[in-house]
Amino acid sequence: QVHLVESGGGLVQPGGSLRLSCAASGTMFSRYRMAWYRQAPGKQRVLIAAITGGGTTNYVDSVKGRFTISRDNAKNTVYLQMNSLKPEDTAVYYCNEAPPSPNYWGQGTQVTVSS
């Protein structure tokens, strides 16, 4: 069983930066392909960035070049560095495996980009 806790969200102005963290409990974390997802108001939750246990990453086009996913397997933590934030990045951000395990969704962390 894996328990995921997201943190680091907040209110930021357009062009600003935030760093999200996802702390995972449970064993064999380093073997999981992990991802960040987001759900904007009135929209479905979507995957935006993923990382394999070995560090290979991929991103959706809307965040490519602005967001960076990384992981520290020793700390069982996945990060999302978000730069050049835009109002359309406003959403609740979640982490989970990729593809996601339904039982692992946490509370998420709210990111609001507004002036």
Image (spheres, rainbow, N blue to C red):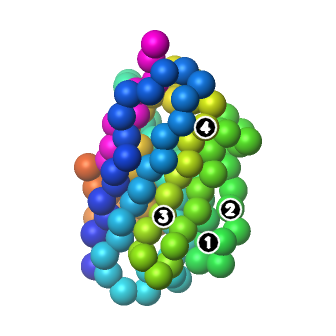
The label shown at residue 26 is none
- Counting other residues with Cα less than 10 Å from the Cα at mark 3, is it few (<14), some (14-19), or many (20 or more)? many
How far apart marks 1 and 4 lie (CA) works out to 22 Å
Dot 2 or dot 4, earlier in sequence: 2
Dot 3 or dot 2, earlier in sequence: 2
| Mark 2 vs 1: CB contact within 8 A | yes
| Mark 2 vs 4: CB contact within 8 A | no
- Counting other residues with Cα less than 10 Å from the Cα at mark 1, is it few (<14), some (14-19), or many (20 or more)? some
Q: Residue at the top extreme?
A: 115
Query: Which residue carries the number 4 mark?
Result: 83
Query: Which residue carries the number 1 mark?
Result: 52
Query: Which residue carries the number 2 mark?
Result: 57
What is the quadrant of residue 52 in the picture? bottom right
Q: Secondary structure at mark 2?
A: strand
Can you say whether 72 is above or below 65 in the image? Answer: below
Dot 1 or dot 3, earlier in sequence: 1
Dot 2 or dot 1, earlier in sequence: 1
Q: Is residue 24 left or right of residue 72?
A: left
Q: Nearer the viewer, residue 60 or 74?
A: 74
Residue 4 position in % (x across, y down):
32, 64
